[in-house]
Image (spheres, rainbow, N blue to C red):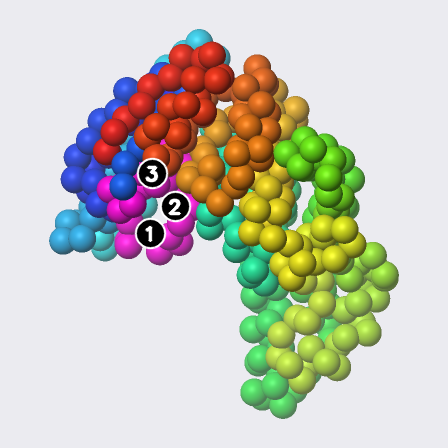
Amino acid sequence: MYLQKISLVNFKNIISQTFDFQEKINCFVGDNGVGKTNILDAIYYLSFTKSYFNPVALQNIRHGEEFFMIEGSYILENREEKIVCSLKKGQKKVLKRNDKAYSKFSEHIGQLPLVIISPTDRDLIVDGSETRRKFIDGVISQQDKEYLQSLIQYNKVISQRNALLKYFAANRTFDALNLKIYDDRLILLGTGIYAKRKSFLEKFTPIFNKKYQTISEDKESVDLVYKSQLHIMSFEELLKNNLEKDKILQYTSVGIHKDDLSFDIGEYPIKKFGSQGQQKSYLIALKLAQFQFIKEQSNVVPILLLDDVFDKLDEHRVSKIIELVNKDEFGQIFITDTHAERTENVIKQSNKPYQIFKL
Protein backbone atom coordinates (compact mmCIF):
# COMPACT_ATOMS: atom_id res chain seq x y z
CA MET A 1 0.00 0.00 0.00
CA TYR A 2 1.19 3.51 -0.77
CA LEU A 3 -0.11 7.03 -1.34
CA GLN A 4 0.41 8.15 -4.95
CA LYS A 5 -0.96 11.67 -4.76
CA ILE A 6 -2.61 14.09 -2.36
CA SER A 7 -4.53 17.29 -3.15
CA LEU A 8 -5.29 19.86 -0.47
CA VAL A 9 -7.69 22.82 -0.61
CA ASN A 10 -8.00 25.31 2.29
CA PHE A 11 -6.46 22.86 4.75
CA LYS A 12 -4.78 24.82 7.58
CA ASN A 13 -2.29 27.22 5.93
CA ILE A 14 -2.47 25.59 2.49
CA ILE A 15 -4.65 27.34 -0.14
CA SER A 16 -4.43 24.72 -2.88
CA GLN A 17 -1.63 22.26 -3.54
CA THR A 18 -1.07 18.82 -5.06
CA PHE A 19 1.86 16.48 -4.38
CA ASP A 20 2.85 13.35 -6.32
CA PHE A 21 4.78 10.92 -4.12
CA GLN A 22 7.54 8.35 -4.37
CA GLU A 23 6.61 4.82 -3.39
CA LYS A 24 9.35 4.74 -0.72
CA ILE A 25 10.69 7.94 0.91
CA ASN A 26 9.23 11.47 0.70
CA CYS A 27 10.72 14.42 2.62
CA PHE A 28 9.35 17.89 3.29
CA VAL A 29 12.03 20.39 4.29
CA GLY A 30 11.83 24.09 5.12
CA ASP A 31 11.65 26.59 7.95
CA ASN A 32 9.24 26.28 10.86
CA GLY A 33 5.72 27.46 10.01
CA VAL A 34 5.76 26.77 6.27
CA GLY A 35 3.32 23.84 6.53
CA LYS A 36 5.47 20.68 6.55
CA THR A 37 3.59 19.12 9.45
CA ASN A 38 0.22 20.16 7.95
CA ILE A 39 0.90 17.93 4.93
CA LEU A 40 1.62 14.96 7.24
CA ASP A 41 -1.57 15.79 9.15
CA ALA A 42 -3.56 15.71 5.91
CA ILE A 43 -2.19 12.21 5.19
CA TYR A 44 -3.13 11.22 8.75
CA TYR A 45 -6.64 12.63 8.16
CA LEU A 46 -7.21 10.27 5.23
CA SER A 47 -6.55 7.25 7.50
CA PHE A 48 -8.33 8.39 10.66
CA THR A 49 -10.89 11.01 9.48
CA LYS A 50 -9.48 13.52 11.97
CA SER A 51 -6.40 15.62 12.68
CA TYR A 52 -3.57 14.24 14.81
CA PHE A 53 -2.75 17.72 16.10
CA ASN A 54 -6.06 19.59 16.40
CA PRO A 55 -9.19 17.77 17.57
CA VAL A 56 -11.47 20.74 16.68
CA ALA A 57 -12.31 19.94 13.05
CA LEU A 58 -13.46 23.47 12.11
CA GLN A 59 -10.08 24.88 13.13
CA ASN A 60 -8.49 22.87 10.32
CA ILE A 61 -10.28 25.06 7.75
CA ARG A 62 -7.98 27.79 6.44
CA HIS A 63 -8.65 31.13 8.14
CA GLY A 64 -11.29 33.13 6.25
CA GLU A 65 -12.51 30.17 4.16
CA GLU A 66 -15.72 28.14 4.37
CA PHE A 67 -14.45 24.58 3.81
CA PHE A 68 -11.48 22.28 3.40
CA MET A 69 -10.97 19.24 1.21
CA ILE A 70 -8.31 16.51 1.21
CA GLU A 71 -8.17 14.01 -1.64
CA GLY A 72 -5.79 11.06 -1.71
CA SER A 73 -5.08 8.49 -4.40
CA TYR A 74 -3.71 5.17 -3.06
CA ILE A 75 -2.45 1.96 -4.58
CA LEU A 76 -3.89 -0.84 -2.46
CA GLU A 77 -3.40 -4.47 -3.51
CA ASN A 78 -2.62 -3.39 -7.11
CA ARG A 79 -5.77 -1.28 -7.45
CA GLU A 80 -6.32 2.45 -7.15
CA GLU A 81 -8.40 3.75 -4.25
CA LYS A 82 -9.58 7.34 -3.95
CA ILE A 83 -10.33 8.80 -0.50
CA VAL A 84 -11.87 12.26 -0.08
CA CYS A 85 -12.44 13.96 3.26
CA SER A 86 -14.16 17.37 3.34
CA LEU A 87 -15.75 19.70 5.84
CA LYS A 88 -17.92 22.78 5.26
CA LYS A 89 -18.86 25.17 8.04
CA GLY A 90 -22.36 24.44 9.33
CA GLN A 91 -22.37 20.93 7.84
CA LYS A 92 -21.20 17.48 8.86
CA LYS A 93 -17.83 16.14 7.78
CA VAL A 94 -18.00 13.92 4.68
CA LEU A 95 -15.76 10.93 3.98
CA LYS A 96 -15.92 9.15 0.62
CA ARG A 97 -14.14 6.09 -0.71
CA ASN A 98 -14.23 5.76 -4.48
CA ASP A 99 -17.05 8.38 -4.55
CA LYS A 100 -19.19 6.42 -2.07
CA ALA A 101 -19.84 8.15 1.28
CA TYR A 102 -19.33 6.25 4.54
CA SER A 103 -22.35 6.18 6.87
CA LYS A 104 -20.07 5.53 9.88
CA PHE A 105 -16.50 6.83 10.00
CA SER A 106 -15.57 3.93 12.28
CA GLU A 107 -15.95 1.61 9.26
CA HIS A 108 -12.94 3.34 7.67
CA ILE A 109 -10.54 2.93 10.61
CA GLY A 110 -7.89 0.33 9.81
CA GLN A 111 -8.49 0.40 6.05
CA LEU A 112 -5.36 2.52 5.47
CA PRO A 113 -3.06 1.66 8.40
CA LEU A 114 -0.70 4.44 9.42
CA VAL A 115 1.70 5.30 12.25
CA ILE A 116 2.89 8.80 13.08
CA ILE A 117 5.92 9.77 15.19
CA SER A 118 5.82 13.42 16.25
CA PRO A 119 7.15 15.81 18.94
CA THR A 120 3.57 16.04 20.26
CA ASP A 121 3.83 12.34 21.24
CA ARG A 122 5.44 13.68 24.42
CA ASP A 123 1.84 14.14 25.60
CA LEU A 124 1.85 10.37 26.15
CA ILE A 125 4.43 10.90 28.90
CA VAL A 126 3.30 14.20 30.46
CA ASP A 127 -0.51 14.08 30.09
CA GLY A 128 -3.05 12.09 32.12
CA SER A 129 -4.13 8.48 31.69
CA GLU A 130 -6.72 9.28 28.98
CA THR A 131 -3.95 10.04 26.46
CA ARG A 132 -2.25 6.68 27.10
CA ARG A 133 -5.57 4.81 26.91
CA LYS A 134 -6.21 6.46 23.54
CA PHE A 135 -2.84 5.14 22.36
CA ILE A 136 -3.72 1.54 23.35
CA ASP A 137 -7.22 1.87 21.86
CA GLY A 138 -5.87 3.39 18.64
CA VAL A 139 -3.46 0.51 18.03
CA ILE A 140 -6.01 -2.24 18.78
CA SER A 141 -8.83 -0.52 16.85
CA GLN A 142 -6.83 -0.40 13.61
CA GLN A 143 -7.05 -4.19 13.37
CA ASP A 144 -10.06 -5.13 15.55
CA LYS A 145 -13.44 -3.69 14.48
CA GLU A 146 -15.27 -5.48 17.28
CA TYR A 147 -13.02 -3.81 19.87
CA LEU A 148 -13.72 -0.36 18.41
CA GLN A 149 -17.49 -0.91 18.47
CA SER A 150 -17.32 -2.21 22.08
CA LEU A 151 -15.36 0.88 23.07
CA ILE A 152 -17.90 3.23 21.44
CA GLN A 153 -20.73 1.39 23.20
CA TYR A 154 -18.92 1.37 26.56
CA ASN A 155 -18.41 5.15 26.46
CA LYS A 156 -22.11 5.65 25.65
CA VAL A 157 -23.19 3.47 28.59
CA ILE A 158 -20.80 5.31 30.95
CA SER A 159 -22.42 8.63 29.90
CA GLN A 160 -25.91 7.17 30.44
CA ARG A 161 -25.00 5.73 33.86
CA ASN A 162 -23.47 9.06 34.92
CA ALA A 163 -26.62 10.91 33.79
CA LEU A 164 -28.73 8.48 35.87
CA LEU A 165 -26.54 9.02 38.97
CA LYS A 166 -26.97 12.79 38.54
CA TYR A 167 -30.75 12.30 38.20
CA PHE A 168 -30.83 10.25 41.43
CA ALA A 169 -28.93 12.99 43.29
CA ALA A 170 -31.05 15.85 41.91
CA ASN A 171 -34.33 14.09 42.75
CA ARG A 172 -33.17 12.46 45.99
CA THR A 173 -34.21 9.06 44.73
CA PHE A 174 -32.62 5.73 43.82
CA ASP A 175 -33.70 2.89 41.54
CA ALA A 176 -31.43 -0.17 41.88
CA LEU A 177 -33.16 -2.09 39.03
CA ASN A 178 -32.74 0.78 36.59
CA LEU A 179 -29.06 1.15 37.51
CA LYS A 180 -28.51 -2.61 37.15
CA ILE A 181 -29.44 -2.41 33.43
CA TYR A 182 -26.44 -0.11 32.86
CA ASP A 183 -24.19 -2.05 35.23
CA ASP A 184 -24.80 -5.33 33.41
CA ARG A 185 -24.00 -3.73 30.06
CA LEU A 186 -20.84 -2.09 31.45
CA ILE A 187 -19.65 -5.37 32.96
CA LEU A 188 -20.12 -7.24 29.67
CA LEU A 189 -18.43 -4.59 27.51
CA GLY A 190 -15.74 -3.58 30.02
CA THR A 191 -14.62 -7.13 30.80
CA GLY A 192 -14.19 -7.83 27.08
CA ILE A 193 -12.22 -4.61 26.52
CA TYR A 194 -9.99 -5.38 29.52
CA ALA A 195 -9.23 -8.89 28.21
CA LYS A 196 -8.25 -7.52 24.79
CA ARG A 197 -6.06 -4.75 26.28
CA LYS A 198 -4.31 -7.29 28.50
CA SER A 199 -3.73 -9.68 25.61
CA PHE A 200 -2.50 -6.83 23.38
CA LEU A 201 0.06 -5.60 25.92
CA GLU A 202 1.38 -9.12 26.51
CA LYS A 203 2.24 -9.28 22.78
CA PHE A 204 3.19 -5.63 22.36
CA THR A 205 5.57 -5.04 25.31
CA PRO A 206 8.32 -7.47 24.12
CA ILE A 207 8.25 -5.83 20.65
CA PHE A 208 8.59 -2.40 22.28
CA ASN A 209 11.48 -3.53 24.50
CA LYS A 210 13.37 -4.89 21.50
CA LYS A 211 12.96 -1.62 19.56
CA TYR A 212 14.21 0.43 22.52
CA GLN A 213 17.21 -1.84 23.07
CA THR A 214 18.21 -1.34 19.42
CA ILE A 215 17.97 2.47 19.67
CA SER A 216 19.85 2.63 23.00
CA GLU A 217 22.28 -0.22 22.12
CA ASP A 218 21.20 -2.16 25.24
CA LYS A 219 22.49 0.61 27.52
CA GLU A 220 19.15 1.21 29.27
CA SER A 221 16.31 -1.02 30.42
CA VAL A 222 12.72 0.15 30.01
CA ASP A 223 9.27 -1.22 30.77
CA LEU A 224 5.64 -0.71 29.83
CA VAL A 225 3.21 -1.71 32.59
CA TYR A 226 -0.57 -2.06 32.19
CA LYS A 227 -2.48 -0.71 35.20
CA SER A 228 -6.13 -1.65 35.66
CA GLN A 229 -8.54 -1.93 38.57
CA LEU A 230 -9.69 -5.19 36.99
CA HIS A 231 -6.31 -6.76 37.89
CA ILE A 232 -7.52 -6.81 41.50
CA MET A 233 -11.21 -7.72 41.28
CA SER A 234 -14.02 -8.30 38.79
CA PHE A 235 -15.90 -5.39 37.24
CA GLU A 236 -19.07 -6.53 39.03
CA GLU A 237 -17.31 -6.35 42.42
CA LEU A 238 -15.81 -2.95 41.60
CA LEU A 239 -19.22 -1.44 40.80
CA LYS A 240 -20.81 -3.03 43.88
CA ASN A 241 -18.03 -1.87 46.24
CA ASN A 242 -18.06 1.68 44.91
CA LEU A 243 -21.81 2.25 44.57
CA GLU A 244 -22.10 4.62 47.55
CA LYS A 245 -19.06 6.58 46.37
CA ASP A 246 -20.54 6.84 42.83
CA LYS A 247 -23.85 8.12 44.26
CA ILE A 248 -22.01 10.87 46.13
CA LEU A 249 -19.71 11.78 43.21
CA GLN A 250 -22.57 11.43 40.66
CA TYR A 251 -20.32 9.63 38.18
CA THR A 252 -18.79 6.18 37.62
CA SER A 253 -15.51 6.18 39.51
CA VAL A 254 -14.30 2.68 38.58
CA GLY A 255 -13.87 0.67 35.40
CA ILE A 256 -11.68 0.26 32.35
CA HIS A 257 -12.05 4.00 31.61
CA LYS A 258 -9.57 4.44 34.49
CA ASP A 259 -6.91 2.13 32.98
CA ASP A 260 -3.39 3.50 32.50
CA LEU A 261 0.09 2.63 31.23
CA SER A 262 3.21 3.15 33.31
CA PHE A 263 6.23 4.26 31.25
CA ASP A 264 9.37 3.27 33.16
CA ILE A 265 13.13 3.47 32.67
CA GLY A 266 15.26 1.46 35.08
CA GLU A 267 12.21 0.87 37.35
CA TYR A 268 11.50 4.63 37.64
CA PRO A 269 8.94 6.81 35.78
CA ILE A 270 10.52 8.12 32.60
CA LYS A 271 8.54 11.37 33.08
CA LYS A 272 10.68 12.24 36.13
CA PHE A 273 13.91 10.32 35.57
CA GLY A 274 14.38 10.19 31.77
CA SER A 275 16.46 12.73 29.85
CA GLN A 276 14.99 14.48 26.79
CA GLY A 277 16.84 12.07 24.49
CA GLN A 278 15.72 9.02 26.50
CA GLN A 279 12.09 10.19 26.46
CA LYS A 280 12.20 10.75 22.70
CA SER A 281 13.86 7.34 22.16
CA TYR A 282 11.16 5.74 24.35
CA LEU A 283 8.37 7.29 22.29
CA ILE A 284 10.01 6.39 18.96
CA ALA A 285 10.42 2.78 20.15
CA LEU A 286 6.76 2.79 21.21
CA LYS A 287 5.62 3.95 17.78
CA LEU A 288 7.94 1.60 15.86
CA ALA A 289 6.53 -1.25 17.98
CA GLN A 290 3.04 -0.03 17.03
CA PHE A 291 4.09 -0.18 13.36
CA GLN A 292 5.36 -3.75 13.67
CA PHE A 293 2.30 -4.92 15.63
CA ILE A 294 -0.17 -3.47 13.10
CA LYS A 295 1.82 -4.93 10.21
CA GLU A 296 1.85 -8.40 11.80
CA GLN A 297 -1.86 -8.33 12.65
CA SER A 298 -3.18 -6.86 9.38
CA ASN A 299 -0.60 -8.20 6.87
CA VAL A 300 -0.53 -4.67 5.42
CA VAL A 301 2.56 -2.45 5.71
CA PRO A 302 1.40 0.84 7.32
CA ILE A 303 2.46 4.24 6.04
CA LEU A 304 5.01 5.81 8.42
CA LEU A 305 5.03 9.57 9.15
CA LEU A 306 8.19 10.94 10.84
CA ASP A 307 7.58 14.52 11.95
CA ASP A 308 10.75 16.36 13.04
CA VAL A 309 12.00 13.02 14.36
CA PHE A 310 15.75 13.79 14.26
CA ASP A 311 15.52 16.86 16.49
CA LYS A 312 16.96 16.55 20.05
CA LEU A 313 18.62 13.21 19.31
CA ASP A 314 22.37 12.65 19.23
CA GLU A 315 23.91 11.33 15.99
CA HIS A 316 24.25 7.84 17.44
CA ARG A 317 20.53 7.49 18.16
CA VAL A 318 19.67 8.98 14.75
CA SER A 319 21.88 6.38 13.03
CA LYS A 320 20.18 3.58 15.01
CA ILE A 321 16.73 4.83 13.95
CA ILE A 322 17.89 4.95 10.32
CA GLU A 323 19.17 1.38 10.67
CA LEU A 324 15.71 0.30 11.82
CA VAL A 325 13.94 2.21 9.05
CA ASN A 326 16.34 0.87 6.40
CA LYS A 327 15.08 -2.64 6.91
CA ASP A 328 12.76 -3.89 4.20
CA GLU A 329 9.91 -4.24 6.70
CA PHE A 330 9.05 -0.59 6.03
CA GLY A 331 6.97 0.65 3.11
CA GLN A 332 6.24 4.28 2.32
CA ILE A 333 7.77 6.87 4.65
CA PHE A 334 7.13 10.62 4.94
CA ILE A 335 9.68 12.79 6.79
CA THR A 336 9.71 16.46 7.83
CA ASP A 337 12.83 18.36 8.89
CA THR A 338 14.06 21.95 9.11
CA HIS A 339 17.56 20.93 7.94
CA ALA A 340 17.51 19.96 4.25
CA GLU A 341 21.16 18.88 4.27
CA ARG A 342 20.77 16.69 7.38
CA THR A 343 17.70 14.99 5.90
CA GLU A 344 19.38 14.27 2.58
CA ASN A 345 22.51 12.90 4.27
CA VAL A 346 20.37 10.62 6.42
CA ILE A 347 18.10 9.27 3.68
CA LYS A 348 20.97 8.73 1.23
CA GLN A 349 22.14 6.00 3.64
CA SER A 350 18.92 4.09 2.98
CA ASN A 351 19.77 3.36 -0.69
CA LYS A 352 16.05 3.62 -1.43
CA PRO A 353 14.27 5.90 -3.95
CA TYR A 354 13.46 9.26 -2.37
CA GLN A 355 12.02 12.64 -3.17
CA ILE A 356 12.59 15.98 -1.38
CA PHE A 357 9.98 18.75 -1.40
CA LYS A 358 11.39 22.14 -0.41
CA LEU A 359 8.62 24.27 1.06
Q: Is residue 323 magenta?
A: no
- The tag earlier along the polypeptide, 1 or 2, is 2
At mark 1, the secondary structure is helix
Q: Nearer the viewer, mark 1 or mark 2?
A: 2
| Up-down relation of residue 301 to residue 282 (above or below) | above
Decide: few, some or many residues near mark 3? Use Cα within 10 Å; few <14, some 14-19, many ≥20. Answer: some
At mark 2, the secondary structure is loop
**What residue sits right under mark 1 in the picture?**
57
**What residue sits right under mark 3 in the picture?**
338
- CA gap between label 1 and label 2 equals 7 Å
Asked whether disc 1 touches disc 2, contact meaning CB atoms under 8 Å apart, the reply is: yes
- The tag earlier along the polypeptide, 2 or 3, is 2
**What residue sits right under mark 2 in the picture?**
51
Identify the image quadrant of residue 346: top left
Tell whether 170 sits left or right of 207.
left
Q: Which residues are magenta?
A: 32-60
Q: Nearer the viewer, mark 3 or mark 1?
A: 3
Q: Nearer the viewer, residue 220 or 6?
A: 220
How far across and how far down the image is residue 6, in percent? 29, 27
Outermost residue on the front side: it is 315
Residue occupying image coordinates x 46% and y 47%: 119
How far across and how far down the image is residue 46, in percent? 38, 34
| Up-down relation of residue 13 to residue 350 (above or below) | below
